[in-house]
Structures are given as C-alpha cells and as structure tokens.
Image (spheres, rainbow, N blue to C red):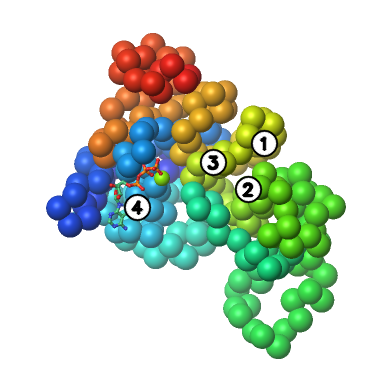
Amino acid sequence: MALFEASHLHKRFGDQVVLQDVSLAFDEGRLSGLMGPNGAGKTTCFNVLTGRFKPDRGSVRFAGQDITGMAPRRIAGLGLSRSFQIMNLFNDDSALANVRIALPHVRRQGFNPWRDLGADSTANEQAAAVLARVGLAGKEHVLAKSLSYGERRALEIAVALAAEPRLLFLDEPTAGLGADGTDRLADLVGELKRQLTIVIIEHDMRFLFRLADTVSVIHWGQVIAAGTPAQLRENPWVQRSNIGALA
Ligand SMILES: Nc1ncnc2c1ncn2[C@@H]1O[C@H](COP(=O)(O)OP(=O)(O)OP(=O)(O)O)[C@@H](O)[C@H]1O
Ligand SMILES: [Mg+2]
C-alpha cells in the first residue's frame, strides 16, 4: 500500500477548474515527481494534498489515515513537511534560529517572547545537526538574508526537515538556481532520498529524471501521463512537448 494516496481530487476556483479527477500514489522510500507546464495545477495539488485547500471532491490518505480536509498543522503533525515555491524564511534571523523555531518541541511550547530561545542548548544542537544534513554546517550564525541563494534554498529544506517528517514535499526546489547550485541540490536530495519519502514538483527535467523513481505529468489539472523516467521518455506526449526535449 502506498504511504500517501490521493483519489479523484477535484478543485475549482470560481469558474476555473484547476484539478480534475487527479489520483496519485506515493510509495514509501521512493522519490516521486510532478511535472507539467506553468499554471497546470501542480502547486494547487500540493496545497490540496497538504491541507492548505480542501478539495471539492475526492480523498487524501496518509499512512492509512483519511486526512481529507484536515488542517495543515494536524497533517504536519502526522509527519508531512513541505517547502514552498516562494521562499518562506525569517530573513533577519540566523540560519540556526530559522531551523530551531521549526523543531517540534520548540513549536509545541508556542510563542513566548520572554523565553530565551538562544539558551536552549538541546534545540541549538538539534538545529545545528539539521543544518549539517543540508550542507550548512558552519553557517549557523549567518543571517538568512546574508546566505547565498543556493544556501537559502538548502535552509528552506532544513526548515522542512526540522519536523523529522516521514514524507517531504518540495515545490520547485531548483527555481532560480544555476547549474552548480542545481547539481549541489541534486546531491543533497539524492542523500535525503535514502532516508525519507519525497515528492518534488520540478520544471528542471534533467534534475527530476535523475532522481525520481516515478513521475506524473499534470496538464490542465489532469494527470496525463505517469511512469518511470524511462517510460516517460518514450511517452509520445512527453516527446512532442518541449518537456521531452529537456528530458
Ligand atoms: N488561491 C487561488 N485562487 C484562485 N486561483 C488560483 C489560486 N491558486 C492557484 N490558482 C490558479 O490555478 C491555476 C493553477 O495554478 P498553480 O499555481 O497550481 O499552477 P502550477 O502548476 O504550480 O504553475 P507554476 O509551474 O507556474 O508554479 C492557475 O490558473 C492559477 O492562477
Ligand atoms: Mg507552482
């Protein structure tokens, strides 16, 4: 049975149908990809899968539990983390502080302006360990805004990893990265893939086909093809589109 399963999802915004009968399954320990043109509905799909939007119809199951319509925080509590297409960091805080605030035991304590977070040595050690996982050892005290673009993207992933998820969703992690940054990120994601289940939305087909076990193509809010990278390279639709040329 798949770790995560979406069945027959529909979502519309006003008159616009954005997801139409979308079914997806993500197997434990695998890296699954979602690709498709701009505006195809990929981010909306993530938003429905992670609880940010309720689907109009259809259901979502995670680890055997029906999570359809459940609040994002509760879903996150079950072991699902995500990064966002548009970066979502506290720019005036250090890399360490950005990760620390996302640690489950720190979040559970809630916001307390009188508590000196910096003095919580367990949290600091845990946050530093997460930073090391994404290649940011030594950058703990650098402000998020002073990191390079590639380091900021890695920090975003660290923030998502702080919750120790079972399942990690990444929305266009290579966006804005050059060739070197993309290669470094591919190495990082390749390493994380050995430790957890990952789903990636990505325009960079070279990146996705190198890492993914299976890929689903979304177009006009529908899944129009799915398979292994090798199967998709043979797919006539993928070959006809410029996605095929890129892959
Ligand atoms: N909150 C919203 N309200 C209304 N329309 C929305 C909303 N979110 C997305 N849409 C619309 O849904 C469609 C799909 O958008 P979505 O962001 O899911 O596409 P995408 O595949 O992620 O595209 P991109 O590759 O550019 O990120 C677009 O037409 C978009 O304008
Ligand atoms: Mg998007």
Q: Is residue 54 left or right of residue 205?
A: left
Residue 212 visible in the snapshot? no
- Looking at the image, is mark 3 or mark 1 earlier in the sequence? 3
Residue 145: mark: none
| Numbered disc 4: secondary structure | helix
Q: Residues within 10 Å of mark 2 (few under 14, many from 20)?
A: many
Screen quadrant of the N terminus:
top left
Q: Residue at x 54, y 24 (%)?
A: 206
Q: Dots 1 and 4: beta carbons under 8 Å?
A: no
- Looking at the image, is mark 1 or mark 2 earlier in the sequence? 2
Query: Compared to 246, does 150 lie above or below?
Result: below
Q: Identify which residue, 243 or 55, lies in the foreground.
A: 243
Gap between marks 1 and 4, in whole Å? 29 Å
Gap between marks 3 and 1, in whole Å? 10 Å
| Numbered disc 3: secondary structure | loop
Q: Residue at x 73, y 57 (%)?
A: 146
Gap between marks 2 and 3, in whole Å? 9 Å
Residue 175: mark: 3
Q: Residue at x 66, y 51 (%)?
A: 152
Tell me the residue that label 2 is attached to.
153
Q: Locate residue 12, reporting x and y percent.
A: 21, 52
- Looking at the image, is mark 3 or mark 4 earlier in the sequence? 4
Tell me the residue that label 4 is attached to.
48
Gap between marks 3 and 4, in whole Å? 21 Å
Q: Dots 1 and 2: beta carbons under 8 Å?
A: yes
Q: Is residue 176 left or right of residue 223?
A: right
| Numbered disc 2: secondary structure | helix
Q: Identify which residue, 233 or 167, lies in the foreground.
A: 233
Query: Compared to 94, does 245 lie above or below?
Result: above
| Numbered disc 1: secondary structure | helix
Amino acid type assigned to the residue bearing label 4 in the image: Val
